[in-house]
Amino acid sequence: MFRIKNISYCYSVTFLVMVALLQNGYCKPSAQLKESSRDVRSIATDLAGFLAECWNNFVQKMSTGIPNLEIPIFDPWLSNSIPFQLQDSDLKASATFNSTSVESAGFSDATMIPQQQNDLNYLINLSRLTIRGKYDVSGNYHYLFPVYGYGSFEILLHDVIGIMNTTVYSTYGKSDQCLVTITLDSFSYKMFSSSFDNLSGFGTDTATRSKFIVAMTKTLWPIIDEQMRSQLSVSLTEYYNDQLQQLKGFSNTFIVVQPQP
């Protein structure tokens, strides 16, 4: 289930939200909640369906950004510089790495899949994500053999999957609105391929060169992943809340607050 917090009370909150979008057409009117046994699943579906629609709209705007909300372009996602120190015990390698003009392309093809029915947490799936940029590296492997390189690089990640977590906050007692916070867990991938131009120092030892490329890729990806997730989480939170605040049915938000035993 999705996580819920109440700003006004230190309670364990069961959140039942029904948004009567009379003008926007996302769900039907509440009919005054005549029965106290309102179907929780249908209420959750209303909100889950609305957030799924927000996701679809957001994805379409990734290539342009949303200037009025100061949401930047996300496809391609850009980073000016990503430096790191490479250490690999298997290769006995140590190297200084820096990448510049890094971009990630393909995120606007992502699909969102509920983890379970009426859940507000989703799997984010991409068939392929491309990362490219410029790099330079210098160091050694097997303690003393020098390695160096510079030029373009490209990484292809296949079957990328992440989890988008939605936390619902109630402002009950203030403006009777609900807001959300979006956080993305680390993205995983099924397989990858990568190439780094002008990587030298291995002679005819192509096996060690391939291992060194794998080590660079596996060190670089988590840094890119963290930066992408951080930016996307902030942008989604901003966009979802903007959409929620434009709704006309906040007066029909229904919240049950249960004190902790």
Image: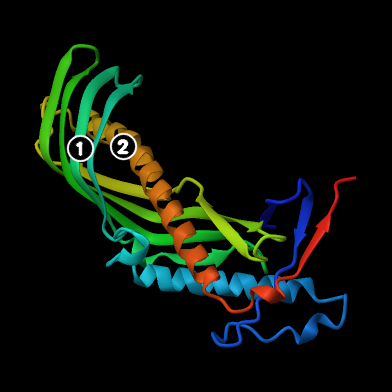
Residue lying at the far right of the rendered structure: 261
Q: Are marks 2 and 1 in contact (CB under 8 Å)?
A: yes
Question: What residue type is disc 1 on?
Answer: Ser
* Marking on residue 99: 1
Q: Is residue 245 above or below residue 75?
A: below
Nearest the viewer among 197 and 2 is: 2
Q: Is residue 66 visible?
A: no
Which residue is at the front of the view, 221 or 20?
20
**Residue in the picture at 29% in, 25% down:** 86
Task: Report x, y in % for residue 66.
Answer: 33, 66
Q: Which residue is mark 2?
A: 220
Identify the residue at horizontal 50%, vertical 50% (top origin).
Answer: 184
- Indicate whether 194 appears above or below 74: above
Earlier sequence position, callout 2 versus callout 1: 1
Q: Residue at x 85, y 83 (%)?
A: 34
Where 24 sits versus 201, above or below?
A: below
